[in-house]
Amino acid sequence: MEAETPTTTTTAAMKTTFLIMNGVILAVGNSGGPLIMRLYFIRGGKRIWFSSWLETGGWPIILIPLLAAYISRRRRRRRSTTTAADGAAKLFLMKPRLFSAASAIGILTGLDDYLYAKGVAELPISTAALLAATHLVFTAAFAFLLVKQKFTAYSVNAVVLLTVGTVVLGLHTSGDRPEGESEKEYVVGFFMALSAAGLYGFILPVVELMYKKAKQALTYTLIMEIQLVICFFATLFCTVGMLINNDFQAISREAKEYELGEMKYYLVVIWSAIIWQLFFLGVVGVIFYSSSLLCAIIITVTIPITQILGVFIYNEKFQAEKGIALFLSLWGFISYFFGEITKTKNSNENNDQTRTTTETDRSSRQIIAS
């Protein structure tokens, strides 16, 4: 549980392992979250604020691994000290500065949850997923401004391709409108989803910036605490919206009227909270072990999975525009990772060359000295 920050004691192999684990968790959450959210809406769910609340409402789940980490910390401390008093471990590692930053990010996340839920409510899941891909463009821009993200020709190419894909997607929006939905509702949903992508593209680099400015040692346990605080305040934000909109009073009535039945309604609700919590855990983990830009790339690469499942499960249309946008998204993804592989290879070659030069110089000095 207590994985150290990649910049300290964690080995390269451990860092890669944890990065892959968090990447998989992120992919599962990002693919399953939109699908189950869409299931809520198409089978009779109508509460936007409640749906957005579910995106972060599963935050108590994180208390389980945090409790396990605390018990482990406490046992280690007691084994290394002589008295029970000296063996006391902190219940929470987060300092006030980091808590304040995570709280502010949580409020922004709550707003983003609402915008995204509104978009998914009005749009086919495949369209909503492709619109969500535009957050990569915003992430790249804000990462450059906030955390001085370095770009290569490949990463710039990826951003451009994804941007073009989104423009293509928006060319014929009216033909993709779900049956029974007005053009105004569709347009509102389209721009809500796009706004959610833009806001989340800002949030990801801000999380990375928060890590850099934390002024305390970062561990994976602390990262989970950060997720807990972010999701708690996001849920609090959405709770206010639910109270204003009288959603709490409507939940039982909505459950009874749900097309799949009352029991399945609550199953959809519970699993929605669980799957979205996987998404947020993956986000903070990938940023911790890599960067906000890679997090955005992983989110983007799961789009084909969401699209294909949306077409098969919900019988949604897969028009030519979506096919072109999908192709451009995959092209952009491949371009980015090819650039990263090339960059790593060149970096390793330069390091080897530097190491060889240093060893040669050292040998020369030893010969001269002798």
Image: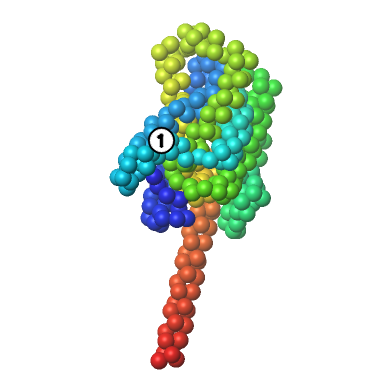
Left or right of residue 64, residue 293 in this image: right
What secondary structure is found at the residue carrying circle 1? helix
| Quadrant of image for the C terminus | bottom left
- Colour mapping used in the image: rainbow
> Residue 328: where, in percent of width, then height?
57, 46
| Quadrant of image for the N terminus | top left
Front residue (pair 90, 176)? 90
Q: Is residue 293 visible?
A: no
> How many residues crowd mark 1 within 10 Å: few (<14), some (14–19), many (20+)?
many
> Residue 118: where, in percent of width, then height?
61, 25
| 246 w.r.t. 190: above or below | above
Q: How many marks?
A: 1
Front residue (pair 322, 74)? 74
| 170 w.r.t. 150: above or below | above
Front residue (pair 130, 80)? 80
Left or right of residue 143, residue 358 in this image: left
**Quadrant of the rendered image containing residue 50:** top right
> Residue 72: where, in percent of width, then height?
34, 40
Instruction: Give, as a three-letter code, the residue at label 1.
Output: Leu
| 93 w.r.t. 249: above or below | below
> Residue 125: where, in percent of width, then height?
53, 29
Task: Give the residue number, with chain letter if any, for mark 1.
Answer: 66
* Residue positioned 66% across, 50% down in the render: 145
* Residue positioned 56% across, 46% down in the render: 214
As drawn, the residue found furthest toward the right would be: 184
* Residue positioned 41% across, 35% down in the render: 66
Q: Is residue 62 visible?
A: yes
* Residue positioned 59% across, 37% down in the render: 100
